[in-house]
Image (cartoon, coloured by chain):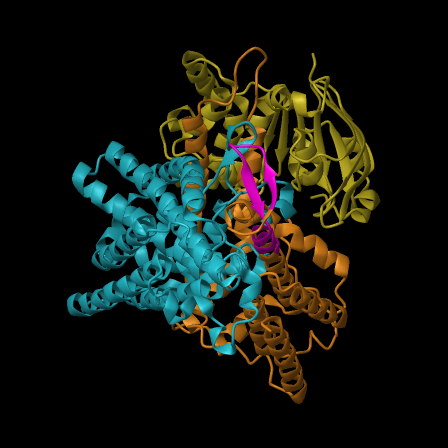
């Protein structure tokens, strides 16, 4: 029975889907790099970058709501930056009467908000990448971009068995749940150490089965002539469309970045 | 005699939108042994997973007169022993003893009681000598019997099994069928093994496409080849 | 972390996957440079050690680590303990295979599930895939040698190795956040260290539970990695990284202005950054800042590690066993 690990690739025939995977990967990275280099407080640039995201999303026929909903993911990590309004020196906005008086500075608030926005923008482009590019194509692109083939092969096999092993882990958890019974009047659940040990044993037995599974896979690969290289076919060629799209994107990103620093 | 299963109008949709159960209503009387058959994808396993609250759908479920709700889950899991298809998923402790002891240990029972329960559960499945063996090294037939023991040690009132004879050679299968015959409990068993159905179960329920399409005395249902063929079943 | 929420409402809260936007560009890029070196080295060592087996073995085990991160247990009041897996992978597979496995896991988590950023992936791999792996492995190996190979000593070694691995990863992440100006070290460090002290308990319990089951059922798997080596190089690289990390932390503390980065930023003014001429595009790199404790901290980490790495490479070459075990 399949548990649903969401593979986010949404197949469609759009300008964006049709671009070479290498171009899509590079442009995503460039976009995120641009976001990173944009100074704090450059809200005009942030809006322009957001417009760029929306433009790409629309071209790729991705529902804006889908994008917004999925990009809520990074919110919890905002806690990491939450002290900024109180610690960055600058013009005092207001004083909070706790801990003997904490001052909130304008610069701190700007920096905090900027970080959140930049994170959110980066995230959305990353989401778009996997929505318009199938994972095997991404792997091919990474390999073409000089990531070592053995690493790509490992990730490729991992991807293939990700869902299988995740299902197995889910079934282990269900089996444990099925035996997590209680009896009226007695405290259940065992000690913390016991529970941790049980979870560990579940992981351990899954690990053993994974070893054995990898043996079987290795034998199957040998039976088909495997000698250490996972060969694959080309996933695409660069067309003029790719070049034009890349040129436009790079030009826009450069423009936004330069303007943001003026 | 509490051991009754009552499912009323159960509907369930998976997170990806696939509707697996379309209003299933099923009652298993105390002491009854019922077989659940049907093609793959009919929703049999999905239905079984609702009986101890692992999956939660819409509709009413009462097990051993307990309404299925968060507060009752612990007691329901003590009352309903659910044995999954793949024994590897259920044997996650190093030794047989540890696995069979998990249920009673989790319930918080004292050590002496736990030991006694492990002993009687293993005896019930005829595996007393395996107590200190390493689960990983057992054959699939042995594992399936141990898996049943891991549930019996909680002394449930109802036994629910998902494909107990799948993957067993004829000898192991025979041993398992004899075991099930001897267990005097309310039982609901999902299976493709029609010969076992004819041998052990007085009532049969046929499922297809998330619905119950037939229910009745096993002898009657299995004598109707047209019905069987319509739902992808074959008699021997 | 959130891909789990999509599934069944299980949550595997992992505070170490840094998203994009929280690390500054130069910090992120430094992380990538370091990662590329170390992963390249790990690839070379693993190829020597495992040969063509490495793809099916490490691929499936990477999938296992990913799946195993979903295995949790209730701790208290709705929170649960869970596994990150670096120490476990290292102890069972050896340090360099462990690095590759965790790299694959972190890469897939970032790419497929946006659990961790793309620019930030360099440091995420360093924190969760290299530091955890090497620390866990070294602590386990050292303790095993000191305490012997009884069941109990293996458990202790496993507990300490797993717990330390998580703590070191957390310390590193705090340093990266501080250097990026996202969170001052005097807040980030205690916060990360204390939260992960608790998370580390979950890691320790699950790791040891897994190890004891494996020791009981397939003890050959555990002795095997001891034979194929990697300990020396792991000691050099891991030791070097940990020392560099400690140096970085103390250089912060020793710096006359612990919030030096904020000071410096204030001197220029945020909005004033916009007025800087073009050559200041990467202000954190420019020379006037060299005297800043922050940059010297980064430099210490990067240079120290590269130095150690080069030495390790040299040692690895010099001591390489001509027989390959496959």
Res. A213 in view: no
Q: Is residue B197 left or right of residue A32?
A: right
Query: Toward the viewer: C268 or C44?
Result: C268
Give coordinates of residue A91: x percent, y percent: 57, 51
Q: Residue at x 58, y 44 (%)?
A: A104
Q: Is residue C82 left or right of residue C247?
A: right
Image hue for chain B: yellow
Q: Is residue B71 left or right of residue B85?
A: right
Q: Kindly indicate the quadrant of the structure image that contains residue C203.
A: top left
Q: Is residue C136 left or right of residue B7?
A: left
Image hue for chain C: cyan
Give coordinates of residue B124: x percent, y percent: 50, 21
**On screen, residue A157 above or below C204:** below
**On screen, residue A178 above or below A72:** above
Instruction: Let me know if residue C34 is in the magenta part.
Output: no
Give coordinates of residue C57: x percent, y percent: 40, 59
Res. A140 in view: yes
**Where does the C terminus of chain C fall, quadrant-wise?**
bottom left
Which chain is orange in the picture? A
Q: Residue furthest bottom?
A: A240
Q: Kindly indicate the quadrant of the structure image that contains residue B83.
A: top right
Residue range (magenta) = A93-113
**On screen, residue C95 above or below C143:** below
Query: Toward the viewer: C260 or A10?
Result: C260
């Amino acid at each position: 029975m399949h548990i649903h690990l969401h593979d986010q690739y949404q197949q469609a025939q759009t300008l964006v889907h049709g671009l070479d995977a290498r171009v899509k990967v590079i442009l995503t990275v460039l976009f995120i790099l641009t976001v990173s280099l944009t100074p704090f407080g450059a809200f005009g640039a942030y809006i322009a970058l957001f417009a760029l995201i929306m433009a790409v999303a629309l071209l790729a026929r991705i529902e804006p709501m889908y994008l917004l909903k999925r990009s809520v993911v990074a919110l919890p990590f905002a806690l990491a930056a939450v002290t900024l309004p109180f610690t960055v020196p600058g013009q005092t906005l207001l004083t909070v009467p706790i801990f003997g008086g904490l001052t909130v500075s304008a610069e701190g608030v700007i920096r905090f908000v900027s970080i959140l926005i930049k994170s959110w923008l980066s995230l959305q482009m990353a989401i778009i990448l996997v929505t318009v590019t199938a994972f095997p194509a991404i792997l091919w692109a990474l390999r073409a971009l000089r990531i070592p083939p053995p690493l790509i092969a490992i990730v490729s096999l991992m991807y293939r068995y990700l869902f299988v092993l995740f299902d197995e882990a889910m079934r282990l958890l269900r089996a444990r749940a099925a035996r997590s019974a209680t009896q009226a009047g007695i405290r259940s659940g065992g000690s913390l150490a016991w529970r941790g040990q049980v979870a560990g044993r579940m992981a351990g037995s899954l690990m053993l089965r994974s070893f054995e599974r990898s043996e079987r896979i290795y034998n199957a690969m040998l039976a088909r002539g495997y000698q250490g290289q996972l060969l694959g076919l080309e996933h695409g060629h660069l067309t003029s469309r790719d070049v034009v799209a890349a040129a436009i994107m790079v030009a826009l990103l450069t423009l936004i970045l330069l303007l943001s620093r003026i | 005699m509490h051991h009754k299963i009552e499912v009323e109008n159960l509907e369930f949709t998976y997170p990806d939108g696939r509707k697996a159960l379309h209003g299933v209503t099923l009652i298993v009387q105390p002491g009854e042994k019922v077989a659940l058959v049907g093609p793959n994808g009919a929703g049999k396993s999905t239905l079984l997973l609702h009986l101890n609250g692992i999956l939660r759908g819409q509709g009413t479920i009462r097990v051993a007169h307990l309404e299925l709700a968060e507060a009752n889950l612990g007691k329901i899991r003590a009352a309903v022993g659910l044995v999954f298809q793949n024994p590897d998923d259920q044997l996650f402790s190093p030794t047989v003893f540890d696995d069979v002891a998990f249920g009673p240990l989790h319930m918080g029972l004292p050590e002496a009681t736990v030991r006694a329960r492990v002993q009687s559960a293993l005896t019930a499945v005829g595996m007393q000598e395996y107590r200190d063996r390493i689960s990983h090294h057992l054959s699939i037939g042995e594992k399936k019997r141990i898996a049943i023991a891991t549930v019996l040690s909680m002394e449930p009132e109802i036994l629910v099994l998902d494909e107990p004879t799948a993957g067993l050679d004829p000898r192991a299968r025979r041993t398992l069928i004899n075991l099930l015959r001897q267990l005097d409990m309310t039982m609901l068993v999902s299976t493709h093994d029609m010969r076992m159905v004819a041998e052990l179960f007085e009532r049969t329920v046929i499922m297809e496409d998330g619905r119950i399409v037939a229910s009745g005395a096993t002898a009657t249902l299995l004598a109707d080849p047209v019905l069987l063929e319509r739902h992808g079943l074959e008699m021997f | 972390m959130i891909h789990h929420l999509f599934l069944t409402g299980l949550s595997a809260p992992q505070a170490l996957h840094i998203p994009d936007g929280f690390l500054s560009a130069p910090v992120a890029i430094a992380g990538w440079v370091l990662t590329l070196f170390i992963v390249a080295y790990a690839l070379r060592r693993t190829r020597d050690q495992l040969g063509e087996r490495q793809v099916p073995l490490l691929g499936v085990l990477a999938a296992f680590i990913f799946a195993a991160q979903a295995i949790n247990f209730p701790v208290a009041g709705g929170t649960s303990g869970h596994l990150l897996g670096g120490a476990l992978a290292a102890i069972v597979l050896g340090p360099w295979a462990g690095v590759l496995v965790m790299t694959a896991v972190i890469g897939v988590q970032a790419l497929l599930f946006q659990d961790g950023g793309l620019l930030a992936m360099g440091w995420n791999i360093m924190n969760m895939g290299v530091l955890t792996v090497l620390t866990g492995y070294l602590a386990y190996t050292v303790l095993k040698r000191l305490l012997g190979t009884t069941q109990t000593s293996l458990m202790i070694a496993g507990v300490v190795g797993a717990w330390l691995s998580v703590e070191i990863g957390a310390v590193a992440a705090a340093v990266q956040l501080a250097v990026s100006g996202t969170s001052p070290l005097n807040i980030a460090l205690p916060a990360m260290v204390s939260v992960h002290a608790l998370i580390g308990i979950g890691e320790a319990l699950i790791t040891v539970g897994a190890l004891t089951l494996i020791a009981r059922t397939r003890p050959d798997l555990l002795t095997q990695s001891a034979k194929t080596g990697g300990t020396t190089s792991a000691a050099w690289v891991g030791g070097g990284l940990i020392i560099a990390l400690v140096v970085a932390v103390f250089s912060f503390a020793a710096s006359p202005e612990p919030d030096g980065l904020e000071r410096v930023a204030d001197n220029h003014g945020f909005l004033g950054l916009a007025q800087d001429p073009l050559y200041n595009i990467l202000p954190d790199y420019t020379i006037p800042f060299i005297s800043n404790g922050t940059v010297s901290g980064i430099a210490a980490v990067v240079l120290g590690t590269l130095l150690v790495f080069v030495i390790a490479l040299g040692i690895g070459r010099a001591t390489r066993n001509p027989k390959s075990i496959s």
